[in-house]
Image: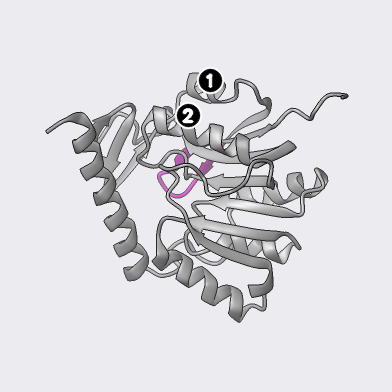
Amino acid sequence: MTRDARHGAQDDAQYEHWQRTYEEHPGMYGEEPSAPARYAAGVFAAAGAEEVLELGAGHGRDALYFAGRGFRVVATDFSPVGLGQLGRRAAAEGLAGRVTTEVVDVRAPLPFGGGSADAVFAHMLLCMDLSTRRITELVAEVRRTLRPGGTFVYTVRHTGDAHCGTGVAHGDDVYEHGGFAVHFFSRELVDRLAEGWILQEVHPFEEGALPRRLWRVTMTVPAQGPA
């Protein structure tokens, strides 16, 4: 089996795992927004953003928080099950008019026009089972989608995390625990992905009981210069 074929089988396994997880554990992350989403909402508002594109929205705790803060939200995920849960919650909370859901696989080009987004948010999406090449391509797609001056806030688990280097190794700093594969980011990778952007902040934080160790990264597309 070739390396590409092996990775394709791994991709399929991760997709099925997430679909099954959302089916068996609806609302698995709770209803309260994540701390990074609370931070991002303030940053986006200060930058004058009106619409937020969320990548990897899952069942929607952060997307619904952004909508409640007055943003229009395009919530994407590769799991129709998770997005179905998000849509039902949006309707129940009177936010359906502010939230659009779309099934998107970030392993392919983003289906949005260039310069069409004010802000992009991705909590732990980039550190899923994605190769460095795919992550690099995805960040380039985010930049293409953002308007000049637009802001990207993302979070990733990093190589200082207790799970990094343990479990089932898939190569390229990807390790699997309990069926979930994670790409652990080095600081060198964060800096490389920020080339051509304005890197505003790399903020370390912890989450969960392990605890998971993450970085919250904020970067912006340079504004257009004078004509």
In the rendered view, how is the structure colored? one colour
Q: Is residue 210 magenta?
A: yes
Q: Is residue 10 above or below residue 15?
A: above
Residue corresponding to mark 1: 192
* Residue 179 in sight here: no
Name the kind of residue labelled 2 in the image: Thr
The residue most toward the bottom is: 92
SS category of the residue bearing label 2: helix
Q: Is residue 47 magenta?
A: no
Whichever of callouts 2 and 1 sits on the residue coming sooner in the sequence is: 2
The residue most toward the left is: 1
Residue at 64% from the left image edge and 77% from the top image edge = 93
The one nearer the camera, 81 or 143, is 143
Badge 2 density bin: few <14, some 14–19, many ≥20, Cα 10 Å: some
Q: Position of residue 60 (x, y in %)?
A: 54, 63
Instruction: Find out whether the residues at labels 2 and 1 contact each other: C-beta distance under 8 Å.
Output: yes
Task: Provide the residue span drawn in magenta.
Answer: 205-214
Task: Locate residue 69 relative to residue 18 in the image: left or right.
Answer: right
Residue corresponding to mark 2: 136
Residue at 41% from the left image edge and 70% from the top image edge = 26
Q: Position of residue 22 (x, y in %)?
A: 37, 65
